[in-house]
Image (spheres, coloured by chain):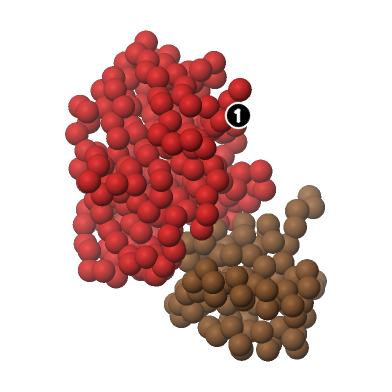
Amino acid sequence: MANTVLHKADTRGFANHGWLQSHQSFSFANYYNPERIHFGALRVLNDDTVLGGGGFGKHPHDNMEIISIPLSGDLEHKDSMGNTAVIRNGDIQAMSAGTGIYHSEYNKDANEAVKFLQIWVFPNQRNVEPRYDQVTLDPADRHNKLQQVLSPNPDDAGVWIYQQAWFHLGEFDKGVSTTYQMKAEGDGIYVFVLKGDVKVNDQVLNTRDGFGIWNTSEFTIIAESDAEFLLMEVPMEFKY
Amino acid sequence: MAQTAILVLCRHPEIQATIIRLINNNAEWTATGFAEPADALNDLKNKPYGLVLLGSGFDETEENELILALQHIRKGIPIVKHYGGGSGLLSAEIYQGLGPLIA
């Protein structure tokens, strides 16, 4: 029997800093809920909106895999490795903080808000050399099928990170379904609905709901309306 | 209001400075930072720290030895690892280390 955990959208943490509005699925910054610290190796899932011209100034990180997925608008990235890049809706960015990195993320547009997911995954190696990766995805590759956007393998589709994790995006028309097979024993999946309604096995999920499922080798997801979603497979037990 | 003294061990100078600044922003906490284990262990002998926060710059072996040494000096002191280097996880890590919140 699979284990599950449901995080309805309106039960997430919320921070409003004016320039930043952040809905937090797990404890982050001033939001602390001891029952929502992490889902396996998935530690942070922030659903952020940054107003025009605003952003995160230069700040340090170490030993964390940090993934950004813009949902609308453009985000300008600069880091201490000399990378300057703009990530847009359709791109995915991964950064291995390793021994230490500084970066800033600013809304490229002075007027329009940028919306993006900020995701942190515990790495499976500490003190690696910092690295930055960015890939542009083809939205057609996730229409009514799963598109792999992240894996542990540098030669595989999407970006890669230092963890046995696989992320997939799906944009399904109403009624379309698929069965997801876990990549590795002991993994769990965290489903995050970006838009619309889906059903995972018997659990109905609405926009911005999160649902974790583990102790199972597969599950079925069906679009109850036209829907977009992100699947994050991560180890439930991990060594750091 | 009694403050909880937090000993921060972190070799990355900017990350240590960030951690110290963020901890000291909370009126309930006060932080002292060290880059070298020997200095931290010596200070732990002399001051009533309530929690140790382990930051970056240590490999696994060094960290395990450090935890044993800290526990030898102050049995039962909460020792928490800080992940990610930035501000995001710090408060949750300290709250977890200090025990359940009382509403």
Q: Is residue A87 above or below residue A174?
A: below
Q: Which chain is red?
A: A
Q: Is residue A193 left or right of residue A92?
A: right
User: Which image quadrant is residue A131 in?
Assistant: bottom left
User: Mark 1 sits on what residue?
Assistant: A3
Of the chain colours in the picture, the one used for chain B is brown
Q: Is residue A75 left or right of residue A213?
A: left
Residue A137 image-quadrant placement: top left
**Residue farthest along the top direction in this orientation:** A175
Residue found at x 40% / y 24%: A180
Q: Are there few (<14), some (14-19), or many (20+) residues within 10 Å of tag 1?
A: few
Whether residue A140 is visible to the viewer of this picture, yes or no, is: yes
Question: Hey, which quadrant is residue B43 in on the image?
Answer: bottom right
Looking at the rendering, in which quadrant would you find the N terminus of chain A?
Answer: top right
- Residue A49 image position (x, y, % from top left): 40, 45
- The chain letter for the residue carrying disc 1 is A
Picture residue at 35% right of the left edge, 59% below the top: A96
Residue at the spot 47% in from the left edge and 53% down from the top edge? A122
A186 left or right, relative to A141: right
Q: Is residue B57 above or below residue A35?
A: below
Residue A48 visible in image: no
Judged from the image, the secondary structure of the residue bearing numbered disc 1 is: strand
Residue located at (26% from left, 54% from top): A133
Relative to A73, A14 lies left or right: right
Q: How many marks?
A: 1
**Image x and y of residue A130, in percent:** 33, 65
Residue A59 point in image, percent of width and height: 40, 67
Dot 1 amino acid type: Asn
* Residue A10 percent coordinates (x, y): 56, 33
Nearer-the-camera pick, A210 or A196: A210
Q: Nearer the viewer, residue A207 or A170?
A: A170
